[in-house]
Every structure is written in C-alpha cells, then in structure tokens.
Amino acid sequence: MSAPTQPVRPAPVAARPAEPRAAGATEATAVARWQQALAEATRAPRWVRRLPVLLVVVDLALEYALPESVAAGFLCTVLPVVVAFSLGPGLVGAATVFTIALQGVLAGRAGHLFEQHHVWVYVTTVLAGLLGAALSWQRRKQARDLVRVRTIADTLQHAVLRPVPAEPGGLRAAGLYRPAQADVAVGGDLYEVCETRYGTRVLLGDVRGKGLDAVRTVADVIGAFRIAAHETADLADLARQLDRQVLREAADCGDEELFVTAVLLQHCPRTGRVELVNRGHLEPLLLSPGSARPLDCPDQLPLGLGDLAAGGEGPTAVELPAGCTLLLYTDGVTEARDRAGAFYPLVQRLARLGTTDPRAVVAFLDQDVRSHSTGLADDLAVLALTPA
C-alpha cells in the first residue's frame, strides 16, 4: 500500500540559488581536474628539470678552470633549448636573456665583450631561445591535446561502461574492467547493472573481435540492454531481444560472423530469487567460504547466433544464499598466462581466498591476475554479486 501523499511546501526564497552554486562547484571541480591533468602531462622528470642548473654549473667551472683564451661560456648557447624540455615559453625567454647576460659577463672578463665570435654567439643564443620557445609551446600544445583525448576517452568509458553501483537492489556488487590495451578506455568486454521493476538485472559479455568495431558493438548491445531491461518481463525474452539486436548490428557492419557471448542475471529483492541465462559464455562461479564451484546452467548459443537454434530455453533458477557471492567474468581472467604458458587457475585461487566479500574478491583478482600473467592479452571484466 502506498504511503499517503505529503503536502508540497514552497521552498524558501533563500534556498533557490543552491542549484546554480552546485553547478558552479561541479564546473570548478572539472576545471581543477583539467588543470591538474595538464600539469601532470607537462611536468618533466626531475633529472630533466635539473639539467639547466647542471649546465650552468659545469660551464662556470670550466670557465674558471681553463685559461681565459678558452671561451667556455659558449656551452651556455644551448641553455634555452634545454630549458624548453621542462618549462614554458615565458621561462625559456627569461633563460635566453639570462644566458646572453652570463655570456656577456664571461666575455667581458676576458676583454672580448664585442669581439666578433662572441657577437655571433649572442645571435646564436637568441636563435636557440626562439627555437626553444617554439619547442616549449609545441610540447605544451601536444600535452593539452593528449589530456583532451584522455578526457574524452574517460568520458566515453563512463558513458558506455558506467561504474558498478555498490548496492543495486537487494545486492552488494563490485566490478573490475581492464582493457588489454592500456591506452584504450573501452575494449570488447561489456557489463551493465540496471535496477528495474522486475528486479536487478545484470549483463556481462564478450564481443567477438577487437578494435573499434568491437567497441561499436559493445555500445550497441549495452544501449539495447538498458532499454529492454526495463520493458521486458521475461529474462529469456530479454536475451532474445539482444540476440536480434546483434543480428541487426552484424548486418549493418557486414560481419556475418559477429556474435557476443553473454550472461544475463535477474535478482528479485523481495524473494531473493536469482535467474540466469547463459548465451555461450563462461559458467558463473558460486563462491562460499572455502570453496568455489561453477554453476550448472544450460549453455545456449551466443547472441547473434540464436536464429540457428530450434528454440531457446527459459531462465535457470539459482540459489544465492547469504554469505555467498556469484562471480561473472570474461575469458580475460581464465586465459591470462604466466611465463610458462599456464592459464590462470581461477577456481583454485578463489577457493583458497577465505572471503566472499565482493570488493575483496575483485581486489584480489585485480592484483592476482596481473601477478600471474606477463601482460593482458585480452580484455578483462569481472562482476561479483552477493545478497545485501
């Protein structure tokens, strides 16, 4: 029975500016993050920042150690270019002025202030300063472009692969996503968690193929799932809708071999009932204290190949007792190899873990898989779910 409707009271006038302030605070936070990322991208290593000082010290030491007939101050001609690798154009200009002044002092000490060779050194230093300023400007421009690309990639990842909610419905959840290519935000693995009127619905899958085509399919399947999960009552019907969506995607991109292996899960918070549909994916694991075992779930054809089957089976009911965790994962976990070529022993490692807390399980896999393998050869996605 729904609760009685409370009367709506007008908000005080003084409280109305709160929304613009929140928006302004969000914008200020975004600007601060941009500036911090830009500062990190343009910050040179410490040894590079120390090179200009080292060059001046060496030059002065040689100037006083060698006879006056040897113009050691000529070494400082490259100082503006060295400064350009760590500082901005303005400071490169200041370094140029400082270098010319230092060269003039050292030349005057030998009585050669306006001697022809020294004049040409001053001219060369000015040219080095101009080139150094251009180099510094270009370096910072490339850093800004790199930060912009990374920001767009991060935004894309959060738009396509949203963060896993900590407590969706009657569950506690944790997730892990690692693309095989470190400089690519989204790979060929996918996941989504939606709270619907039918319960909490979860999708985890793996697209055949790699590259931009796989990313396109990931975005397409997740978008279709986010819509259909709220409109389709039966989990098997939801899987069939996704199957048809992958077929349309295959026709659009001209890839007759496109398919997506996936596991769909539904959890009802009122009854605690869990249902699974496995479309050609790896069997989920049920973790209990001291053990880990694959769930017996009928394996159907992957999404995109469902038209080859005579008929689809219904969802499989699964028991998920309190204190147990259901683990969904992609083959980036199980196919991680060590130096000897051995696959990652997922079941054995989790059976000895000693905890079923989702966050602890995901954190363990994040470290343990990377420790086991010499490098990720495939994308990796993990979802751990347990009753709240």
Image (cartoon, rainbow, N blue to C red):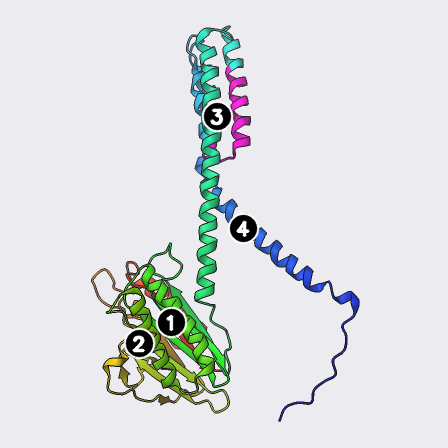
Secondary structure beneath disc 1?
A: helix
Q: Which mark is residue 303?
A: 2
Q: Which residue is mark 1?
A: 221
Residue farthest to the left?
A: 340
Q: Which residue is mark 4?
A: 34
Q: Position of residue 183 (x, y in %)?
A: 38, 54
Occupied quadrant, residue 247: bottom left
Magenta residues?
A: 84-103
Is 35 in front, or is 50?
35
**CA neighbours of label 1 inside 10 A, class few (<14), some (14 to 19), many (20+):** many
Is 287 in front, or is 312?
312
**CA neighbours of label 4 inside 10 A, class few (<14), some (14 to 19), many (20+):** some
Secondary structure beneath disc 3?
A: helix
Check if residue 90 falls in the magenta segment: yes
Check if residue 27 falls in the magenta segment: no
Q: Earlier in the sequence, mark 4 or mark 3?
A: 4
Secondary structure beneath disc 2?
A: loop
Q: Kindly identify the residue that appears in the image at 73 percent across and 62 percent down.
A: 17
Q: Which mark is residue 130?
A: 3
Answer yes or no: do the residues labelled 1 and 3 have beta carbons within 8 Å? no
Q: Earlier in the sequence, mark 2 or mark 1?
A: 1
**Is most of the magenta stretch helix, strand or loop?**
helix
